[in-house]
C-alpha cells in the first residue's frame, strides 16, 4: 500500500512538472512573438487557436495566459476576450523612462561585473547592429539590438533587475520596434552603442549608466516626435490606448 501511494505521488509530481514545463514554454513563445512584433498590442489571444498552434492542450495555454495577465502583458477586454496589452501614451512615456533607469543600472553593474565571454557577446551584437545598419536591414538590426541590450542585462548578474527589465521591455517592444524602423534611427544608434560599450569595458560605472540612460529614453525626443512615429506606422497608430 505504501509503495502504491509513493508511486502515485511520484506520478502526480511528474505530471505537475510536465504541465508547468508546457505552460512555461507557451509563456516563452508568446513573449518572443510579442518581442519580435509577431503579436501586436490589441491582438486577440484565443485559447483554442493557441493550443492548436503550439500543439498542446488548452490547459497549459490557459495557465500561460493567466501568468501573462498577472504580469500585465495580457489584459481582458470583456466579450472581446484576452488581448495583448495596449499602453496609454502617458503610460508609454512613463514605461520608457523607467526602462531607461533600469537599463542604466544594468550598464553600471555590468561595468563592474561583466565576464570575458559576455564582453565578446556584446561586441558581436554591436557588430551585427553595424552590419544591419549599413545594409539598411531594420529587421536584423532590431534583433541584434535586442541581443545587445539583453547581454548587458545578463552581465549585470542581477536576477531581480533582469526580470523587471524583461517585463517592461516586453510591454514597450512594439513601440520601440516602430521607432527603430524610422529613417536614420539605426544609424544614430551605432555611436550610442559604441559609447555605452566603451564605458562598460573601461569599468566606468557612472558613465555607463548615464550613456545608456540617454540612449534609451525617448523623453529627449519630445512628445511630437513620438506621436509622429506612431502615426507614420499606419495601422499601428491605434497601438496607444
Image (spheres, helix red, strand yellow):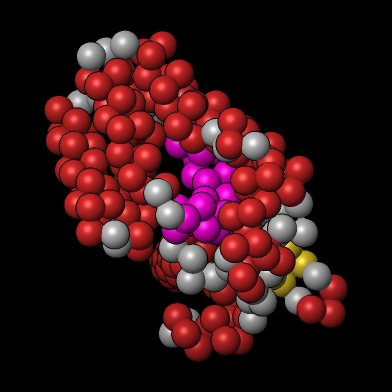
User: Which of the two residues, 230 or 76, is positioned nearer the viewer here?
Assistant: 230
Q: Which residue is painted at 59% across and 63% down in the image?
A: 232
Q: Main secondary structure of the magenta part?
A: helix
Q: Which residue is painted at 58% across and 65% down in the image?
A: 233
In the rendered image, which quarter contains the C terminus?
bottom right
Q: Position of residue 126 (x, y in %)?
A: 24, 41
User: Which of the two residues, 62 or 167, is positioned nearer the viewer here?
Assistant: 167
Q: Is residue 210 left or right of residue 93?
A: left
Q: Is residue 180 magenta?
A: yes
Q: Is residue 44 magenta?
A: no
Please identify the quarter of the rendering in which residue 137 is found. Answer: bottom left
Q: For the view shown, which residue lies furthest in the right direction?
A: 78
Q: Position of residue 138 (x, y in %)?
A: 35, 60
User: Which of the two residues, 42 or 59, is positioned nearer the viewer here?
Assistant: 42
Say if residue 16 shows up in the picture: no
Q: Which residue is painted at 45% across and 80% down in the image?
A: 54
Say if residue 95 shows up in the picture: yes
Magenta region: which residues? 161-182
Q: Position of residue 129 (x, y in %)?
A: 26, 48
Please identify the quarter of the rendering in which residue 60 is found. Answer: bottom right
Amino acid at each position: 500500500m505504501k509503495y502504491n501511494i509513493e508511486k502515485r505521488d511520484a506520478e502526480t509530481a511528474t505530471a505537475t512538472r510536465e504541465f508547468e514545463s508546457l505552460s512555461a514554454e507557451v509563456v516563452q513563445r508568446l513573449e518572443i512573438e510579442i518581442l519580435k512584433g509577431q503579436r501586436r498590442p490589441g491582438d486577440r489571444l484565443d485559447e483554442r487557436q493557441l493550443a492548436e498552434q503550439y500543439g498542446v492542450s488548452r490547459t497549459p495555454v490557459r495557465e500561460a495566459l493567466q501568468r501573462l495577465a498577472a504580469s500585465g502583458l495580457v489584459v481582458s477586454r470583456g466579450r472581446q476576450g484576452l488581448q495583448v496589452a495596449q499602453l496609454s501614451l502617458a503610460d508609454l512615456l512613463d514605461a520608457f523612462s523607467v526602462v531607461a533607469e533600469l537599463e542604466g543600472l544594468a550598464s553600471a553593474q555590468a561595468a563592474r561585473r561583466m565576464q570575458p565571454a559576455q564582453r565578446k557577446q556584446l561586441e558581436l551584437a554591436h557588430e551585427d547592429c553595424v552590419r544591419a545598419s549599413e545594409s539598411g536591414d531594420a529587421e536584423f538590426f532590431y534583433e541584434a539590438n535586442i541581443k545587445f541590450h539583453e547581454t548587458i542585462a545578463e552581465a549585470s548578474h542581477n536576477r531581480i533587475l533582469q526580470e523587471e527589465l524583461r517585463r517592461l521591455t516586453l510591454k514597450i517592444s512594439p513601440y520601440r520596434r516602430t521607432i527603430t524602423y524610422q529613417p536614420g534611427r539605426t544609424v544614430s544608434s551605432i555611436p550610442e552603442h559604441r559609447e555605452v560599450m566603451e564605458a562598460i569595458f573601461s569599468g566606468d560605472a557612472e558613465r555607463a549608466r548615464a550613456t545608456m540612460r540617454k540612449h534609451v529614453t525617448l523623453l529627449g525626443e519630445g512628445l511630437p516626435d513620438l506621436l509622429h512615429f506612431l502615426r507614420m506606422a499606419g495601422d499601428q497608430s491605434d497601438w496607444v490606448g
